[in-house]
Structures are given as structure tokens and as C-alpha cells.
Amino acid sequence: MAATTTTTTKRTVKRTTAKKSPIEILAAEKAKRPEGEEREIEAVPKRKILFAASEATPFIATGGLAEVVGSLSKALAKDPSYDVRVVLPLYSDIRPEHRRKLSFLGNIFVPLSWRNQYCGIFSCEQDGVTFYFLDNEYYFKRPGCYGYYDDGERFAFFSRSVMEILPFIKFYPDVLHCHDWQAALAALYLKTIYCHRPEYQYIRSLFTIHNIEYQGKYSLDILEDLFGISNQYRYLLEYQGCINLMKGAIECSERFSTVSPTYAEEIKSPQYAHGLQDIVRRNAFKLSGILNGIDTVSYDPATDRALFANYDAEHLENKGICKSELQKMLGLPVRNVPVIAMISRLVAHKGLDLVKAVIEDVLRDDVQFVLLGTGDSVYENYFRDLGRRYTGKAATIISFNGDLARKIYSGADIFLMPSRSEPCGLSQMIASRYATVPVVRETGGLYDSIKPYGAGGNGFTFASYNPYDMLYVIREALNVYKNESAWKSLMKKAATTDFSWQYSARQYKKLYDDTLAPKK
Ligand code: GLC
């Protein structure tokens, strides 16, 4: 079941006898090809990429990380010269419709310090990508993905298993692409333990930060006992008196990246880096920022089955049906007033304090406000209460509901996303694709994806983290909304902005090449 082919072609290159790195093999093969000749190159090994991540759509998702791992791997796999695989934990929350697709490949035992843990290996193909799921009921047969006292141990087991399964699945990637702190240890294990083994010696690692706020910090005394990393490597992980897994992965990966060019700059400063600015700056020579894309097939208002009616950028009439049905569903009067929506985790960095400060001013106008999300109880309570106080004007739904989210993306007019920091943000792109005009703060990926209306852009933006600046641009948006034809062309502009992976996947391929390039 585990795919073992790694070449497209007629002749197989045996890496063991060739004793050349993948990049050298590619260069040699290219050199053999006569200038300008189009024939298929013989025996060029596929570029092998292994993603290690804690979540991926469509199997398990708690946020943007899953969307990116799922849709980037799929976009890369469209290139026949790429062999892309993803490793995930087999959580009990993975639903039966997905579990049914999995085949059991076998099991191994994974060393983790003094422990020796069972690891079952399941697999399936999805959109050209091979997914592996690592099973250990002690670690993963629990509700949800995170939030347990032993998360450090759970993801150490996961990361160690990623390295241990390679001989079993007979797949030694060119690039091990680790995402966020949960997979950071895989890069560390590669550098501290596995790179000395012949089959692993050419594997290079890329570490992608989806949010620098969550670093994986642990007490120093568990380095050997729990993570199984020898004290001689303590210097790689130690930071400000504790183990910092993100810091370790930044230090020891050939390259590291984050999910927008602006965030890549921002995390060099203390305002955004949550203490890691010095590490980021010191390693800035190997840092890139690549803006995420979205899955434009899954998020397509022309075909999305969750919508009350389908439409596209050229035929926006049915968006009116989406709006009136949404209003009905949420108990709001069905009226042609601007609907302002937020879909967000209810946590501080999403800019909810700005919203709290001026939402009642906004509601003084003839508008409706819809909020969908879950998170910190202070915000949940505040918005629940707002919904009660402004019945018929404001609707709050405290839930994480993908189907309702799509109905809101399509039924609203304005999408508000005033984040204090936002590594990339996907919601503004999805809203935009559904012709719902974004109002965003100029930070991270919001700055890179939404440009101001005044400058011919696809939304409205404000710079400083200040509620009155936000209020000002919301009112600007409400003014433009009154001008039907101007609003229609703005909706069209938003809906036709290219947020597909096409461009960004190309940038990742270039980054993989750079990751593999011999050090000068
Ligand atoms: C994290 C970030 C978000 C980003 C997502 C995917 O959730 O907070 O901004 O879009 O990861 O990279």
C-alpha cells in the first residue's frame, strides 16, 4: 500500500550506489539534456516532500494550519515531478467517513527516551497526496487535538515517529517540511540523531511558522527524560530558561519560513515575536515569507453546496438570496441593509477589543452585525450579551461551524478582520472570493492580501491599532455601499482577486530548491 516509487521514468537511479545528493543528481541530469530539447528527462527523481503537521484538511482541522497543510500539499502534488506526502497523528476525532478510507500498513515501536511506544501506521491517498496517520491510543485517543498536560510528550512521540517510519514506508524525503511547534522536534531529531544514518543524510528540513505565539515551551529538566535529546544539544533548544521547540527548529533547519512576507518582517520585532525576535533576526538570512493561498475549488461560490444559492463574480444576483436566507436563519429582519460579519477565534490578537470599543457606534447606523466563533469566555460572553441587547440587529453564534461559516461568507456584505497580529489569515481571502468586501487592519498577511479601495484595491484597510481608525474605515465602507454601482465593482474586484495557490506553490518549490542547495 505504501507507495514506494520515487521516479517517473524508465530507468531508476539508485541513490545508494550513486552517493550523490538529490540536487547533484538533478543538476547532472539537466546537464545531459541538449539545450532547448523538450523530451522527457530520463530517470529524474521526483522531488520528495514530507510534511509533518498536527492537522490537515479534510481529515482534522481546528484552524488555518489544517487548511494550509491540506491545500498546499494538494497544490504541489499537481506537479507530476513532485511526490508529496503528509504525516498526521491519528486522533480519535478523525471522523468515520475518513477512517473508512485508511489502510493499515503495519506497526513499529518508537523509542522516546526510556520509553518504547507502539506506533500503528495507516495510510490513504487524497488528491494526489499520500497521507500517513500515526496511531497510538494512549496519546491520541482523546477528544480534540491539543490542550492536554502532556502535549509536549504527545508531539515528541509524533515527531520521533515521523523519523522512525521512513524505513518502514521506504520514503526518504528530500525536504522534511515541519509545521509549527508540534512538528518542530522532527527537525531537531533529524539534526541530532538521524542525520548520522546513511539513508537520512541527504534529508534537509524546512520549518514553517504559522503563528509565532505558540512556541512549545517546556521545563529544561525534561530534555533527556521526555524528549530523548542528549544534553549536548541543549544549546539548540534552550531559550530564556526553558526548552523552546520553535527556537530549536529555527536554529537547526536549513530554512525557515512564515506565511506572509509582511509577517516575516514583523517577527523580527518584539512587538510581534513573543520573545523570539533575537532568534529570528540572527537567522534572518534563511527566512522567507510566502503568502498562503486558499483552496479555490473548495471555496467557490459557484459550486459551494453549503450556500443557499450559487453565484460568481460575473453574476452576483444570487448573492442577494444568500443574504436574505442568512438573515432569516439568524432571526434578523430581511432587509437590504449592509450586513457586517466576523468569523474568528475569539482571542485577543484578533482585534476584538477594537470591536468591543466601537461596535455600538457602528450599530447606531442602519446595519446588521453577525459574529461566529468560539474562544475566550470574556469575548464569548460579551458578544452573546451584545446579541441579546441588539436583537434584530446583531446575531452572535458561539460555535465552530464550517457550514454556517460558508453561509455567512456568502450572505454578508462586509467582512471585518481587525487583527492586532495576523501571520496570514485565510478568512479575508475566502470572504473576498465570496464577493464580501474585507475591512482589515494592515498587518501580516492582511496587509499583503487586501489593498485599500481608495488606491483601487479590493477592500478597506487601516493602519494603527486604534478603534476610531477602524470605525472610520467601516464608515467609509458603508458610504461606498450606498453607491450601488461602485459597490458592485468593488465586490467584483474582491471576488476576482487571485488567492489560489498557483503563485505561492511556485514560491514553495523555489524554497525547497534553496533548502536543498549546497551550503556555500
Ligand atoms: C495560523 C495563523 C493564521 C494563518 C494560519 C495558516 O492559524 O494565525 O494567520 O492564516 O495559521 O497559515
Image (cartoon, rainbow, N blue to C red):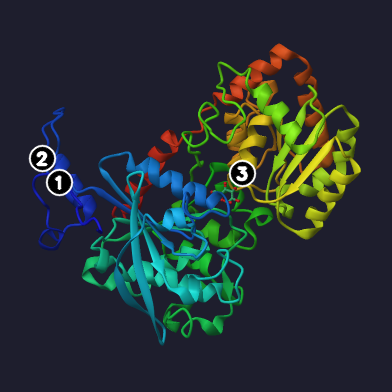
Whether residue 491 can be seen here: yes
Element type at mark 2: helix
Percent coordinates x, y for residue 153 in the rendering: 50, 76
Say which residue appears at 20% left-offset and 52% top-offset. Answer: 6
Q: Nearer the viewer, residue 13 or 436?
A: 436
- Residue 40 in percent (x, y) is at 14, 35
The answer to whether the residues at label 3 and label 1 have Cβ atoms under 8 Å apart is no
**Disc 1 secondary structure class:** helix
Read off the residue under disc 1.
Answer: 28
Above/below status of 16 relative to 429 = below
The amino acid beneath tag 1 is Ala
Label 1 environment density (alpha carbons within 10 Å; few <14, some 14–19, many ≥20) = few
* Residue located farthest toward the bottom when viewing the structure as drawn: 114
Tell me if mark 2 has few (under 14), some (14-19) or many (20+) residues whose alpha carbon lies within 10 angstroms of its own: few
* Residue 170, picture quadrant: bottom left
Name the residue beneath numbered marker 3. Answer: 444
Q: How far apart are labels 2 and 1 at the CA level?
A: 6 Å
Task: Say what amino acid the circle numbered 3 marks.
Answer: Gly
User: What amino acid is found at the position of numbered circle 2 in the picture?
Assistant: Lys
Q: Are marks 2 and 1 in contact (CB under 8 Å)?
A: yes
Dot 2 corresponds to which residue? 32
